[in-house]
Image (cartoon, coloured by chain):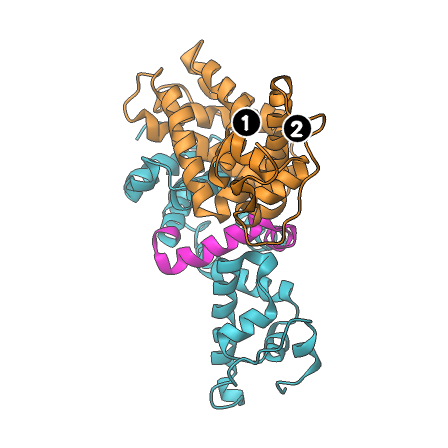
Chain colours: A cyan, B orange
């Protein structure tokens, strides 16, 4: 893996080498390097969008040779997929927990979890980067579509015995995605400044209603 | 208004004149020219996003001089605002009708109206263009934010006597916006292929619940 590998010179743009990997690449460095590339990928996709983000730019930001990005992740699509997986990891951990416990409170657990992830700037930023790429680029949308179907909707659905559960989960997720767009992206008032706890109290019964098919009580709170 | 007005030469890019306005600019042509520029603006914002869309590119697509775009609309921000207003016009017409009639069916009217706009490719395309620009560009988000607050939320809110009605309407709109994102942008299944009528039946009670504060019955349908 050298700076002059063919993968590094595929682009017709003038060559600019990244800083060499700090301390060289050894087996012990690999996880740190991989993480550094992922962080750089997330920042690059966030700043420039999927279209304009190049493997070369990601490598430059990570301070590694572009060939190393290809080595760890493959194509730009695969780098994006890995960045989505990394940003979504806390969501997926939550998705595992959500179906456990009292099924009448699954709506509250999902809603509370969702706000936990979005209210925390450290997890919000990567999610915003994904939202921007997914909305503007069909390839990114396709990656995201396969990802949430396989990893989120099916994993929650297979633990719940409710007819038509996949579309029910998607309508519940749509409620939360719409709140994320209006509160964190568009920042429309008064929604953007509302207390998270107030919103959780309003949204949890709706999420519950979608998922449990109206079986749970859905009154004013 | 000539091809060599100062506004047309503000950009340092090499000059490329658009085709001259068809048949010259007379008072009778003005509405058609304005419409042609708006259509070109919408297509240009949709294709390139807010950032990369230039007044020059919009003018070229419309077959007019860039100075004419400035003449009718002003800055790029103002062109975008006009494109938002045009794409949102059917939504706003609906917003006027929504608060009329039985307040227990306002959720169904809003939901049905929303699907009417999004299911029709002619009105869906401009809305998709707005979504893409708003999500990726802060200026566009700001324009959109002011626009929906002034024109949609307040206009519906002032006709309804419910406490905290603005945030209630926003949560209802968030449910519908999230469905639009997952169904028409990300196209996640089974939501993307579901019958609109099925979704309206599922969503109308939720929209009603948000707006009427749980006062209306919200049971399974």
Whether residue B46 is visible here, answered yes or no, is no
- Picture residue at 50% right of the left edge, 40% below the top: B76
Q: What residue is disc 1 on? A: B86
Q: CA distance from mark 2 to mark 1?
A: 12 Å
- Picture residue at 38% right of the left edge, 27% below the top: B150
Q: Chain of mark 1?
A: B
Q: What residue is disc 2 on? A: B122
What percent of the width, then of the height, locates residue B59?
Answer: 62, 39
Q: Nearer the viewer, mark 2 or mark 1?
A: 1
What percent of the width, then of the height, locates residue B158?
Answer: 33, 18
Q: Nearer the viewer, residue B44 or A149?
A: B44
SS for callout 2: helix
Q: In the rendered view, would you say B94 is above or below A95?
A: above
Give the side of residue B84 with respect to residue B24, left or right: left
A123 drawn magenta: yes
Give the side of residue A134 with respect to residue B64, left or right: left
Q: Across the whole image, how many numbered discs are drawn on residues? A: 2
What percent of the width, then of the height, locates residue B78?
Answer: 47, 35
Magenta part of the chain: A118-144
């Amino acid at each position: 893996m050298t700076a002059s590998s063919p993968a590094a010179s595929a682009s017709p743009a003038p060559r600019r080498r990244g800083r060499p990997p700090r301390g060289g690449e050894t087996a012990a460095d690999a996880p740190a390097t991989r993480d550094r590339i992922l962080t750089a990928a997330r920042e690059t996709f966030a700043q420039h969008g999927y279209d304009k983000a190049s493997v070369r730019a990601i490598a430059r930001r990570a301070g590694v040779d572009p060939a190393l990005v290809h080595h760890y992740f493959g194509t730009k699509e695969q780098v994006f997929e890995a960045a989505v997986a990394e940003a979504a990891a806390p969501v997926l951990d939550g998705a595992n927990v959500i179906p456990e416990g009292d099924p009448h409170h699954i709506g509250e657990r999902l809603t509370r979890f969702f706000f936990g992830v979005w209210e925390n700037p450290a997890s919000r930023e990567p999610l915003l980067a994904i939202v921007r790429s997914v909305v503007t680029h069909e390839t990114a949308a396709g990656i995201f579509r396969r990802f949430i179907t396989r990893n989120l909707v099916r994993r929650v659905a297979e633990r719940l015995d409710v007819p038509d559960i996949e579309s029910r989960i998607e309508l519940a997720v749509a409620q939360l995605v719409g709140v994320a767009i209006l509160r964190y992206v568009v920042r429309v008032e008064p929604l953007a400044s509302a207390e998270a706890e107030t919103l959780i109290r309003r949204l949890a019964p709706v999420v519950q209603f979608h998922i449990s098919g109206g079986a749970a009580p859905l009154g004013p709170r």
